[in-house]
Amino acid sequence: MLSRHAERPLAPDNWIHAPVLVLNASYEALTDIGADRAVVLVISGTAETVAERQPHFPIRSKHLEIALPQTIRLLRYVYLEHSVLVHDESRATLAGVLRRDRHRCGYCAGWARTVDHIRPRSRGGPNTWNNLIAACGPCNTRKADRTPDEAGMRLLWEPRAPTDMQRRQRRIWKDLVTTGTQ
């Protein structure tokens, strides 16, 4: 599986939040998107499914049934500047942290839309990759202006600066070859 984090079991009410890896037409990793957007891209013919989510989870409508994708590939190449693909370690951004953590809360693994400073900004906590983690609204509110220990919360993983694109590409290819998908 391509995900770094444990996935919650999918159910009819939460499948739209499942992260889906988007590859360029050249199989370069671009980003993660929600499963609902990925399904729209596949149905519209903009992308194709490269790997299906396991166990099989069908998405049904009145006229159509498709398997929920784990990874999709755009059918047209998207031209991006190289700097967009390589993360700048000195600049941790909201979008970058959410992408790194695959929109998973670092405290409960739920769907994250915010970023939390592990060491609060009010105590000199910097805006760095190692001090920022994706967080859902309830966990971010519960932790508030405290450290995780003070709030009685524990991190599910240690945040780190994202790896360079070449390492990620090797991992993606290894996973795709291992699962037998091409």
Image (cartoon, grey):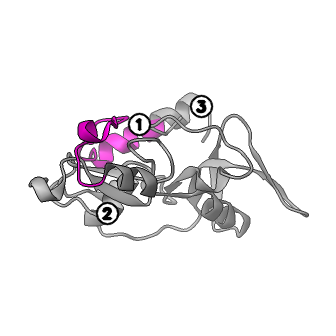
Element marked by disc 2? helix
**Magenta highlight on residue 146:** yes
> Which quadrant holds residue 163?
top left
- Viewed as shown, does residue 167 lie left or right of 177? left
Binning the other alpha carbons within 10 Å of mark 1 as few (below 14), some (14 to 19) or many (20 upward) gives few
Q: Earlier in the sequence, mark 1 or mark 3?
A: 1
Residue at 62% across, 60% down:
38
Instruction: Give percent across and percent down for residue 15.
Output: 66, 51
Residue at 70% across, 34% down: 55
Q: Position of residue 103 (x, y in %)?
A: 45, 53
Q: Which residue lies furthest to the top in this view?
A: 178
Residue span colored magenta: 144-173
Residue nearest the viewer, comparing 68 with 147: 147
**In the visual, does 53 lie left or right of 135?**
right
Q: Name the residue under label 1.
A: 171
Q: What element carries label 3?
A: helix
Q: Which residue is drawn at 45% across and 37% down?
A: 5
Kindly report the distance in space between the C-alpha atoms of the residues bearing marks 1 and 2.
Answer: 24 Å
- Kind of residue sitting beneath label 2: Leu
Residue 71: within the magenta?
no
Q: Name the residue under label 2.
A: 94
Q: How far apart are marks 1 and 3 (CA)?
A: 12 Å
Q: How crowded is mark 3: few (under 14 residues within 10 Å), some or many (20 or more)?
A: few
Pointer 3 residue: 179
| Mark toward the start of the polypeptide (1 vs 2) | 2
